[in-house]
Amino acid sequence: MRKFYLPPIFQFSRKERTGIILLALLIVVTHYIPDLWPASEPAAEEDLQAAVKAFEQQLISDSIVTSARRDTYNRRPRWTTERSFPPMKKDTFRHARKPAIKPIDINTADTLLWQLLPGIGPGFARRIVRFREALGGFYSIQQVAECYGLPDSTFQKIQPFLKIGDSSLKILDLNLTDEKSLAAHPYIRYKLARQIVQYRSMHAGFSKVSDLRQLPLVDDIIYRKLEYYITVKP
């Protein structure tokens, strides 16, 4: 008997044949699986539709109630709200105004009055008063700026609030004032005080105030400052 041979392309190993059989069975089972489980019951689908419709009706009902409440609130008489909360007057809260700064007399003001000026604290107030007392009084507002440590910016702030009265100055007699008292004056100090005493000893005193210009330490600036505080009695 003649044997029948398949071409090599149709020859499979044992494992390959087993795989082909399993694949064929899987295709058949997959094809018939939908027939094994019946479709969902129509009643369950109808219940779902009914639930969705009920939910939509509830949303519509809630919207109507909310709208009705809003309309009721808007139609309320205005006086009921105003009666509960009276309108606030514009002048209910007023900003506190700083008291206006009054000018002070630089020759009579005490430390408390000086502290009312902008930038002047207790320290500067005491220093200005002591400087005024050592000078024997101010003859010019610009002298306040000479106070030790006082910034020029602070002086510019307080200058509009300074005035000078008719207070008399303390005058020093060049022929009678002792060396210690002369040295205590801010415009004289110890070296110039020593020269003044020596000059009047050598020249039998000062004959006039302008004789002070003959001293080496006295220039035009020092003389112009001192001429308000010195005198020579006949």
Image: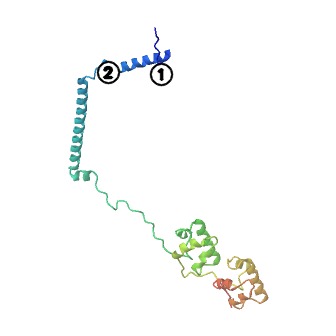
Count of residue discs:
2
Snapshot quadrant of residue 51 = top left
How far from the left and from the top, in percent, is residue 195? 76, 83
> Please, which residue is most extreme toward the front here?
1
- Quickly name the residue at label 2: 34
Q: Nearer the viewer, residue 49 or 8?
A: 8
Residue at (44% x, 18% y) in the render: 20
Q: Position of residue 72 (x, y in %)?
A: 21, 46
Q: Give the x, y percent position of residue 47.
A: 24, 26
Mark 1 element type: helix
Spatial distance from mark 2 to mark 1, Cα to Cα?
A: 36 Å
Q: Is residue 67 shown above or below 103?
A: above
- The structure residue drawn at horizontal position 49% and vertical position 16%, both measured from the top left corner, is 15
Residue at 22% from the left image edge and 53% from the top image edge: 79
Q: Badges 2 and 1: C-beta atoms under 8 Å apart? A: no
Mark 1 — residue? 9
**Callout 1 amino acid:** Ile
Badge 1: residue crowd in 10 Å (few <14, some 14–19, many ≥20): few
Residue at the far right in the pictured view? 202
